[in-house]
Amino acid sequence: MNDLLYKKLWLLFAQAVTICLALLFVVRLFFPHWLENANHTIMVKEATVLGGGVKPVASSYSFAAKKAMPTVVNIFTTKNAPANPHQKFLDDPAFRQFFGDQLDDDGPTQPENSLGSGVIVSEQGLILTNNHVVAAADEIEIALSDGRKMSAKVVGTDPDTDLALIKVDADHLPAITFASSDKLNVGDVVLAIGNPFGVGQTVTQGIVSALGRNHLGINTYENFIQTDASINPGNSGGALIDADGDLVGVNSAIYSRNGGSMGIGFAIPATLARQVMEQIISQGGVTRGWIGIEAQDITPELAESFKLHQTEGSLIAGILRNSPADKAGLRAGDILLEIEGKPVTDSGSMLNLIAVLKPNQKATLKIARSEKIMNVAVVIGKRPKPTLAKE
């Protein structure tokens, strides 16, 4: 009895499968669009709709731009033309009676005008910019994003990093939020805000192309962020911000063969800019550590000559007499490997590591001498006003 029941159930199952396959064959043969619509419906995913029917735009950086743009100002500088030393003779009627129109020229020399950008760093009107934007200016005027114009004065400058701090007489201004540039990574999205060619406030977008760029011959102390966000003349001193609208750098220079952007721009890291700004505010200038050496990078040839396993470090090529390095017993030919536990990769990093040390601070330097590794204690001095690029 059971065997007969199983045979009937199996026969019903086989017939059902056969009928289904036959129906599927007929549908695929005569009505293929039924199957296509079904597959299409399964694959499509509808975007989530927010309140008000607005769909999120993942590729937009409008939030960051809107947050930072009010904090970036246009800077207009004027340099008065030097007085003509012979002007008193030119204005003498008796003198002009003999020479007449031969003395006439193109008229009085016009003032020279320049432009750049700046970033408001405090609600009380402090503005960070490049030193080269305001260095030779006799008059400085800034234009806010809301159209207001104000006169500004220089609070302090630091030519070694090409930074300057200026101030306008105003309160309750929109101020930028500082991010830690030490947390930047190559590939991070950044926006450059400034006033290129005087056309007005402009935002460009790119990525961080490289970090720690030095040996460019731009400043004494170089630790640039390289970016492909378009930076052009007039952007100097403007903001480089991250995707959250926070300051990660101050736009400073470009590599260009024709004066325009070629996708290689350089910005001073916000961490360094903040250190310089705080010193200018507190003491009117920047004080840096100094030990009094001349250094050069380790080339593969030098590494082989000194029997080094790598080309990192900085070779001490000379020592100034009675300098902190001289008093500590450092010698020409020593190779600096570490400063206060931080590795020295080249002479540029050596400059930066010593610069942040405070005068009269005792620091430990790890050196290689005659194929031996040793530590040397040095009392850091105060860097004098440099005439040469020496540490």
Image (tube, grey):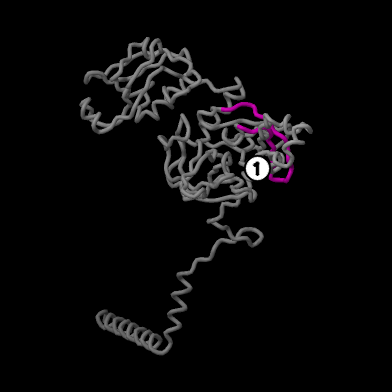
Residue 272 locus on image (x, y percent): 51, 31
**Tag 1: Cα neighbours inside 10 Å, few (<14), some, or many (≥20)?**
many
Left or right, residue 136 beside residue 301 = right
Residue located farthest toward the front when viewing the structure as drawn? 98
53 versus 127 height, above or below: below
What residue is disc 1 on?
74
Residue 49 locus on image (x, y percent): 59, 61
Any part of residue 71 in sight: no
| Rendering quarter of residue 53 | bottom right
Q: Quadrant of the N terminus?
A: bottom left
| Rendering quarter of residue 26 | bottom left
Which residue sits at x=64%, y=58%? 51
Which contiguous range is marked in magenta?
136-157
Q: Nearer the viewer, residue 355 or 63?
A: 355
Which residue sits at x=48%, y=32%? 219
Left or right, residue 159 beside residue 71 = left
Q: Nearer the viewer, residue 315 or 272?
A: 315
Name the dominant secondary structure of the magenta segment: strand
Residue 372 in magenta?
A: no
Q: Quadrant of the C terminus?
A: top left
Left or right, residue 35 beside residue 278 = left
**SS at mark 1 in the image:** strand
Residue 201 locus on image (x, y percent): 63, 48
Any part of residue 177 in sight: yes
Q: Nearer the viewer, residue 114 or 142?
A: 114
27 versus 352 height, above or below: below
286 versus 189 height, above or below: above
Name the residue type under label 1.
Asn
Residue 149 in magenta?
A: yes
Which residue sits at x=48%, y=69%? 44
Q: How many marks?
A: 1
